[in-house]
Amino acid sequence: MKKLSIAQEELLLRFLDGELSEEEIKRLKNQIAHSPELQNRYTELKTVHSFLSRKIQLDEPSKLFTQTVMNGLDRNPELANHSYKNGIYLLAGILIASALAVMLLLNGVFTETTSSLVIDATSLQNKWMTLPTLAIPFNVKIIINGIIFLNLGIALILFDRTVLKPYFQKRIMIH
Amino acid sequence: MITTEDEYLLIDRILAGERELYATLVNNYKRYAFTIAMKVLENRPDAEEAAQDAFIKAFHYLKGFNRKAKFSTWLYRIVFNVSISYKRKQKPVFQNIETSIIEYSERADHNTEQQDKNLFIAKAMNKLNEADRLAIQLFYIKEFNLEEVAEMMGQNTNTIKVRIHRARMRLADELKLILKEEALTL
């Protein structure tokens, strides 16, 4: 059986959609009458067309629909939903803050900043007990590094939620 | 149905503070809005909620409606977008293929052959990709034309036209295939 071209199929669909001129309809009807392939395909497409025309109807919402909408007019829809734009702004802010911290770190701003956490135990000392001074040394550089890593972690999560997830969901919808 | 001019007057009055008049717009478009949401979400309670949210959103942004397009087109785009964001939040539902077929077949014709064909097409509908299925369903709601469907889905008119043509050809192919298989098993 001879296979129909895409153009012929498109012509049949345009005919079903009522997009053809009188002249085109006459010509196509003549072609259908002389080609069993075209006739078969026309029947198949017509079956699909009539099914969709008959079966796809308007759905009826509930009786309380309008009342529910009117009662909810004071509700701010923006507050209920996560804003995609806000996520992007937050992501940009986190990245800028992390970049600044990295730059400061690379320029050696925190290199010499070491300190120790001194716990004042003098109030606990008395004549029977002498406590040594407790000092926990800590490096500011390590803390800044930790904050940067934490920021980058948050930035990655935000990137996933605000950019990657919506992008791939949209791609799934389109293809 | 109210005319475009009457609709603009109504919108002006709503914006001037007569918010109870918004009910007229809701009543006028609720079936269309709900149908769009139903086609996207395929779930009645979610569709109802999404359509209602879309109307509330439209009310809040009514000031921004620039009147270059029809109010209905502007509203349907909001409904479509709200429904899509609901769909993203929706947990995946593993719909039984037989159940979805029943939805179509319940309203099927009494003629057995026609009923079978309808069942086959309904089965084939489930094989279409989501965007093609949505495009074809919205296009066959008589009140929506190609441009409106394109505007709603945020895509080019030609892209939507290709989707609708491709979907119908695919449905016809599936129908042919199923009927051939049926004939062979007889």
Image (cartoon, rainbow, N blue to C red):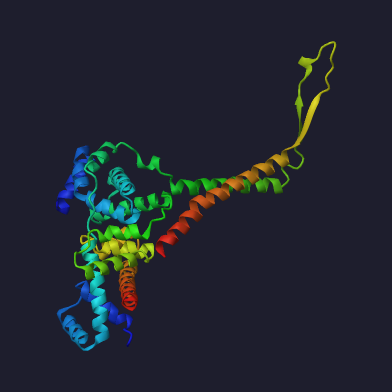
Where is residue B2 drawn, in percent x and y? 14, 51
Where is residue A6 drawn, in percent x and y? 32, 80
Q: Is residue B178 above or below residue A88?
A: below
| Foreground residue among B85 and A97 | B85
**In the orientation shown, which residue stands out farthest toward the top?**
A127
**Residue at image point 32% right, 77% down:** B180
Q: Is residue A20 left or right of residue A169?
A: left
> Quadrant location of the N terminus of chain A?
bottom left
Q: Is residue B183 above or below residue B106?
A: below
User: Is residue B107 in view?
Assistant: yes
| Foreground residue among A81 and B8 | A81
Where is residue A106 drawn, in percent x and y? 71, 49
User: Is residue B67 in view?
Assistant: no
* Residue A117 picture quarter: top right
**What number of labels is visible?**
0
Where is residue A111 drawn, in percent x and y? 75, 43
| Foreground residue among B97 and B20 | B97
